[in-house]
Amino acid sequence: MAVVAASIFVLMYAVIVSEKIHRTVAAMLGAIAMILMGILSQTQAISHIDFNTLGLLIGMMVLVGVTSHTGVFDYVAIKAAKVAKAEPKRILIYLALITAVFSGFLDNVTTVLLMVPVTFSITQKLHLKPAPFLLTQIIASNIGGTATLIGDPPNIMIGSAAKELTFMAFIENLAPIAIINLIIVIFIIEFIYRKSLHTKPELQQEIMELDEKASIKNRSLLHRSLFVLGLTLLGFFTHSLTHIESSLIALTGGFLLLLLAGGSVHLVETTMKSVEWATIFFFVGLFIAVGGLIETGIIGMLAQKAIELTGGNVTSTSLLVLWLSAIVSSVLDNIPFVATMIPLINDMGAMGIANLEPIWWSLALGACLGGNGTLVGASANLIVAGLAMERGVKITFIKYFVLGFPIMILTIIISTVYVYIRYLM
């Protein structure tokens, strides 16, 4: 059965990487094959689905879906451009910072969906090439998403698997290195594109004359959205005291906002359409497929081999996981990789590695920052490229790779120093 399970998983992974078939279809068919081949019973399959991860994703998608109707994200972007005095270099930096912050507290996929249209609007008015701004936002979204439990799907999965890693623990451990990486990367990119970041004074004046307040479409809904968002974040921050699961906090926030927004049939249906159900079912299929590897003992065997390779040494294991996660996540989607690594790390703990915390942080840093390596490394990258293509701007694999891969390596080198000094000395 182990050979069959491994064959199904490898085939599923190959199809996901090829992008010939949508990854959701590939993952669900892989999961179904695990059940039909008798590797998992339906009961076992359901037990391997991490409903905490799914609930957190759905809750935040609902919360952001309702909030997006207020126009607040357009307001913030236009206000930032005006604060920057419509100076292209400053706009590049400010939009990157906004993208990073939003990515930390909303999630990076939702953030880029909201930021790209506004970025095109501002760059068109200033007659600037949008590519430098879009590339910067891709990288900033992945770095910003690294900083919190809810910023990037790999972190959500890790936080759900390692219950001791609370919302505050993610911020305390990952936000400092995310901020350091972000500052260094933004100024490197600004230096690289400095020659193309120039515009005319009369075009800058057009930006300064924009009324950001006109972007707010529904003030009443905005106040309710900010109130509920604040309550939700408070719930995340106080998780260590209340012990309420992050999924329940997110779902409560999402559906409370729907209620306060009126709970009309139209609003609910519109909001549900904004939930990325393809992503949700991708996770379902993935959890079940990985469950097949767990039940057949393959994950345990891999954990044993990893411990033999590193001698069970926490330092060697942490740095191996950090670099392996980064390199693999740069060429493959980081979500299936993390789904495979989580039970492997848990098995390492069961086999004698007492302190798993540095290994968990290494996995989070490697998977999230590794997503910056290539255009296919993270979902946010592909979404920005797709939105750009719709507007006639082509971001090719090579064009992104030339910028993204060296930056990814730099951030992993910086993170290696951080992990070693903070946890392993």
Image (spheres, grey):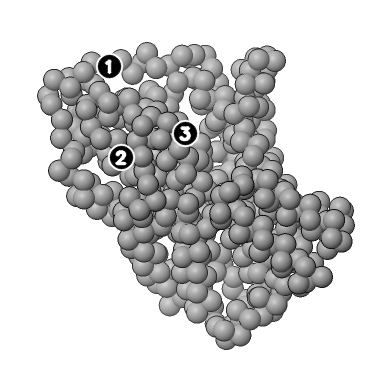
Real-space Cα separation, disc 2 to disc 3, in angstroms: 15 Å
Residue matched to label 1 = 210
Real-space Cα separation, disc 3 to disc 1, in angstroms: 22 Å
Q: Position of residue 396 (x, y in %)?
A: 37, 47
Residue matched to label 3 = 113
Residue matched to label 2 = 131
> Pointer 2 and pointer 1: residues touching (CB < 8 Å)?
no
Q: Residues within 10 Å of mark 3 (few under 14, many from 20)?
A: some
Q: In the rendered view, does 237 fall on the left or right side of 244?
A: left
Real-space Cα separation, disc 2 to disc 1, in angstroms: 23 Å
**Viewer can see residue 161:** no
Q: Residues within 10 Å of mark 2 (few under 14, many from 20)?
A: some
Q: Residue at x 19, y 32 (%)?
A: 87
Which quadrant is home to the N terminus?
bottom right
In this view, the residue in front, 41 or 217, is 41
* Mark in front: 2 vs 1: 2
